[in-house]
Image (spheres, helix red, strand yellow):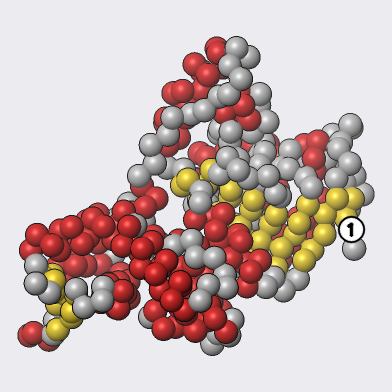
Amino acid sequence: MLFKNGINLQPKLSEYISNSRRLFIFSPYIKLETLKALIDRQENVKAVFVRWETKDLILGSSDLEIYTYLKAKGITLYRNSRLHLKAYIDEYKNCFLTSANISSRALNLPPYSNYNYEIGTIVEDLGIEDRLFFNIIESDSILITDNIYKQLSEQLPERKKEFPDEKEFHFKIEAPDKDFLISALPMTYSIETLYRIYENKEFVNELELNCVLHDLAIYKLPLDLSSTEFREKLKEAFFSHPFIKRFLEDLELTGEVYFGTAKEWIHKNCADVPTPRKFEITENIQILYRWIVKLGNGKYVVDRPNYSERLIVVK
């Protein structure tokens, strides 16, 4: 069934949002007033993705102020200049697809006399390929932090002065934070589990599948690779990731790292705000050790002197 703007699009979208458990919103253009009207009373929105090309902000197609609003609500904001689709994804299982951006004209919210002709529909039971597609977009997006917001806010007035003398407008953004989030580390229990689900598309539960989709997106692994191609591409992507490289560079200097020391290092170097408590990242370190040893082809081993796991560089 198609939902039409000015008739039932906005009510059906609001109903979908209210009934969702963990919602991820993708919309190229987002106006603050409409966003507030859409989600102000909702506590289930986890992340929002916006295009935020320079011209979008100069022309007012999107509002920069949505960052402070979302931050106050504890909602993560991402920027992806390639974003053009409009979708509301509930736990990456089903979605509300629409042609409408988040603006008064597009959703008739607040009411707009000359609203756009827009449609939407609900798609149930997203397949693994569909879910991976959205995971890839998330992996490819820039996490907006106070630092990034400050950079954009400072550059926007100058870009406005130059408009329309330039054909292309680009912000200069330094965004190292995202690569050092805990979520940038592998999440799947083992390489064997990762490849089993990758090859057979069979999984024990949603948590297991979500971990696999996360890792396939982080390391940009396309579907339908052979076993050999899969391992080669995974190894290259894993060891070239900034978080892993930094950790292993420090490991090379000492030759070994005990589990407690590794936990201290991750805790100190992660960019998460707030920083997770040390006991919360125990499983992350266990998975990281397994991946390093398995993909290291004998360069790294783990032993357990004095009941504490130790990662060693084999000389």
Q: Hey, which quadrant is residue 252 in on the image?
A: bottom left
Q: Position of residue 90 (x, y in %)?
A: 65, 65
Q: Position of residue 19 (x, y in %)?
A: 71, 66
Direction right: furthest residue = 7
Q: Is residue 258 visible?
A: no
How packed is label 1: few (under 14 Cα within 10 Å), some, or many (20 or more)? few
Query: Image check: 302 left or right of 7?
Result: left
Rendered position, 200 above or below 255: below
Q: Hey, which quadrant is residue 13 in on the image?
A: bottom right
Amino acid at the residue labelled 1: Leu
For the image, the number of numbered tags is 1
Q: Quadrant of the N terminus?
A: bottom right
Location of mark 1 (residue): 2
* SS class, disc 1: loop
Q: Position of residue 158 (x, y in %)?
A: 49, 16
Q: In the depicted view, which residue is nearer to us: 192 or 137?
A: 192
Q: Hey, which quadrant is residue 65 in on the image?
A: top right
Q: In the depicted view, which residue is nearer to us: 222 or 68?
A: 222
Q: Is residue 123 visible?
A: yes
Q: In the depicted view, which residue is nearer to us: 248 or 150?
A: 248
Residue at (56%, 54%) from the top-left corner?
137
Q: Quadrant of the C terminus?
A: bottom left
Query: Image check: 59 left or right of 277?
Result: right
Query: Image check: 254 left or right of 220?
Result: left
Residue at (58%, 16%) from the top-left corner?
166
Rendered position, 49 above or below 297: above
Q: Position of residue 117 (x, y in %)?
A: 89, 41
